[in-house]
Amino acid sequence: MAAGIGWAAVTAGVVGLAAHLATRALFYVDLLVPAAIGVGVGALMAWAVRRLALSRPLVAGVLAGTAAAAALATHVALDFRAARQDRAREIEELARLRSGGGVSDEELAAVKEAILARWTLARYASARAGFDDTGTFTGTPPVLGRAGAVAVSLVELCLALLIAGLWAAGEARDPACPRCGAWRVERGLGAAAHGVARELAARLVAGDASGAAEILRPPDTREQVLLSVMTCPDGHDGEGGVVRICEVSWTRRRRLALRRVADLEVDAADLTSLRAVFSEESAA
């Protein structure tokens, strides 16, 4: 947990800085930049989940969501710093232009200090979120008005959190050994005819391994059901493990897509029944 929290903090800083540099070099696009932040945080947190053996989806999702929110905050804070520096340079340039008009340096410095005193992070963040629709900090008033700008900001926040949280939680949802926490290693069992994935899962859940084996037939098309077994690399599962059932089917665009149907815990007897079916098919 400590390593996960630390990695979440590092991820937030790195992704926030990358987003700031990218938008400064190019431009900010509503929804797209927060989505990219969510993808970046999700990918890094998913990698950390595998490395740290963090097999708790809720914990992984919360850490990734928190890191995404922190990355957005870092992005805004860095943008504020850059915008304040730009504003200070504009004031100095204006002061140089007006220096010949009889305005003293002290008066110009006082004006500069008064203007920059209004440039606080809280006010800038409020303007970025849409609560300040004067355009003082963002340059132009929000096109959608205050309510529209606030709604877009909320959507952007939820989008980044959902992408990062679901990605990390999905990675943590893979079966892990309850004793040592190591990710189970996946090995293929075989392929069966298409259309039996849900019935196969239902029979295995009911404890009817022999009935599940009866409905398995060799695939006759490119659409098929793929079975694999996932076991602890240190042998803590014994002769059992987790059977993963996936379905390969055509999409509307006539492309084959792999979809996971179920991950089911099975004992040694159930796994032996399934292996026997594929052994007989191989022998035939």
Image: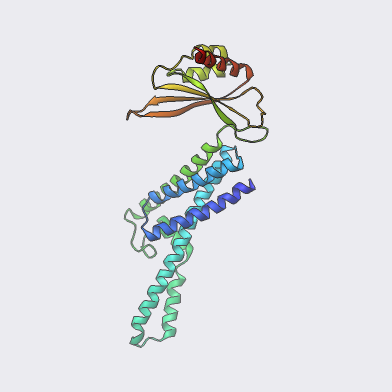
Relative to 49, residue 20 above or below = below
Image quadrant containing the N terminus: top right
Q: Is residue 238 visible?
A: yes
* Left or right relative to 58: residue 101: left
Count of residue discs: 0
- Give residue 168's position: percent from left, percent from top: 52, 41
Q: Is residue 208 visible?
A: no
Please give the name of the residue rendered at 38% of the width and 49% of the height, measured from the top-left corner: 32
- Give residue 237's position: percent from left, percent from top: 65, 26
Relative to 38, residue 191 above or below = above
Observer-nearest of 159 and 15? 15
- Give residue 226's position: percent from left, percent from top: 48, 23
Please give the name of the residue rendered at 46% of the width and 56% of the height, measured from the top-left corner: 18
Which residue occupies the extreme front position in the image?
A: 283
* Left or right relative to 185: residue 251: left
Observer-nearest of 109 and 14? 14
* Left or right relative to 213: residue 80: left
Which residue occupies the extreme bottom position in the image?
A: 102
Relative to 273, residue 264 above or below = below
